[in-house]
Amino acid sequence: MNNVRVRFAPSPTGPLHIGGVRTALYNYLFAKKHGGEFILRIEDTDQTRYVANAEQYIIDALDWCNIPFDEGPNKNEKFGPYRQSERRELYKQYADQLIASGNAYYAFDTAEELDAERTKAEAKKEPFIYNHSTRQKLNNSLTLSKEEVAAKIEAGEKYVVRFKMYDTSFENDILTTTDLIRKDVSFKLFLLDDKVLYKSDGMPTYHLANIVDDHLMEISHVIRGEEWLPSLPLHISLYNALEWTAPQFAHLPLILKPVGKGKLSKRDGDKLGFPVFPLEYTNEISGEISRGYKEDGYLPDAFINMLALLGWNPGTEQEIFSLEELSQNFSLERVSKSGAKFSPEKTNWFNQQYLQAKNNSEVAELFTAILTEKGIQANAAYIETVVGLVKERAVFVKDLWDLSDFFFTKPTEFDEKASKKQWKADTGSLMNEVIEVLKPIEDFSSANVETILKEWITAKEIGFGKVMQPLRLSLVGALKGPHLFDIAAMIGKEATLERIQFAIHTLG
Ligand code: GLU
């Protein structure tokens, strides 16, 4: 495929939903697969919905996901600027061109006038649509004389430019086009309204700005969410009216709720306890903080792998893909038409797979950050060994703390239920004997301590559990953790004896 240029074109109205991240990802993968460019364009023409920290959030999110854009705000601005608000001068000429060619017209109807039309239609139990069925009776340049129009504009009267979506003089009242995922799609043009393209405040609407920019930025493929499919007939008609070649379109399926029907929302995440945003987000006005995958401890490559498979399948059983493998394998043909159900459990499974695949020293590095936060200092080799002992049970790096805290701090209290069950009246004196057995051991390695203690237990003819469980309780504070003698060897003889003494002192 030649000159593939795709874009991710979010509106900076808030944090990026994971559906948006997936759109960005599929654009990125498609570009990489075909040796093309991935562009970030900020669609900020709707000033009423503009949120100041949203653009930086989007950039930070793409950065965390490791899906860098080739061109965008402040980066390789070949076709820049990439913020629509900085391109506003550019759009008017195209609105003018569409008016001149008879494809668009000025409309001066006030909000009150349009309301009155709506009320009239309602009385007849009909919907009001500004289109071929009504435009000839309304306040626009199709019904006013040239002079009247010029006078109104001259007088500074507010207007909008509307696109003539359909006219009875058209050859076809149905538009059929191809979507790369949905194949042939048809739209009844005569049912659609004459969308506003431009407003007298000098701002284009999304529709005009979007297609002008896709054209000027030489976008070859528009890959975007299914919610934009209804806009497709308008966009294709605009390309035709401007006599431009339209890019190819692909509309991605929705990401669905884990249970029930409908699009995955922030409420679903709140209810079921998972984030729907890549990064934590603070609402500037309400101060409300929304959770993010990053802050919740997910690894970015696991998150991306999960998202890639939410709507796309490789056609094989393979589930684990590096970003590189994804870009080699990705194709729009294998993106499904129907919605993809989001699964928080599967997301955790991916995280676990990625965590287990990392070597101990990589995980130790991530874990060290958590230890430092807790004010714990330990040497790198020690942390790495601990990681090796407990990693297999972790889904997240942060799980390592619960799995291994006793390697770094001594227990200050003991699990109540376990103490009741395992620490009997004679346990204290038995543990005093254990201390005497351990004291003289010089080679305090796991295997040696195990041999000596087990020989002693056998000679004493008591059950192993009578010693092992209280010993675990003493060293760990609960009945958890890896092989008991590995723990003893790791913390060393002195700490082992000290912890047993403290347990005897506390539990009797
Ligand atoms: N600005 C639109 C959005 O926020 C972009 C739609 C498109 O990709 O054409 O999703």
Image (tube, grey):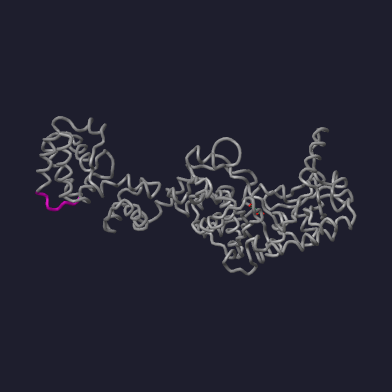
- Name the one closer to the observer, 260 or 96: 96
Residue 260 spot, x, y in % from top left: 57, 35
Residue 410 to residue 53: above or below:
above
Magenta region: which residues?
A: 440-445
Image quarter (top left, top right, bottom left or bottom right) of the N terminus: bottom right
Q: State the predominant SS element of the stretch in magenta.
A: loop
Q: Is residue 339 magenta?
A: no
Left or right, residue 392 beside residue 190: left
Left or right, residue 434 beside residue 145: left
- Name the one closer to the observer, 475 or 324: 475
Residue 323 to residue 467: above or below:
below
The total number of labels drawn is: 0
- Name the one closer to the observer, 115 or 246: 115
Residue 129 spot, x, y in % from top left: 80, 43
Left or right, residue 145 beside residue 96: right
- Name the one closer to the observer, 122 or 359: 122
Q: Residue drawn at (71%, 52%), measured in percent from left and top?
A: 179
Residue 425 lies in quadrant = top left
Q: Residue furthest front?
A: 155
Residue 45 spot, x, y in % from top left: 66, 56
Residue 205 spot, x, y in % from top left: 71, 54
Q: Is residue 443 magenta?
A: yes
Residue 30 to residue 392: above or below:
below
Image quarter (top left, top right, bottom left or bottom right) of the C terminus: top left
Left or right, residue 391 beside residue 348: left
Residue 221 lies in quadrant = bottom right
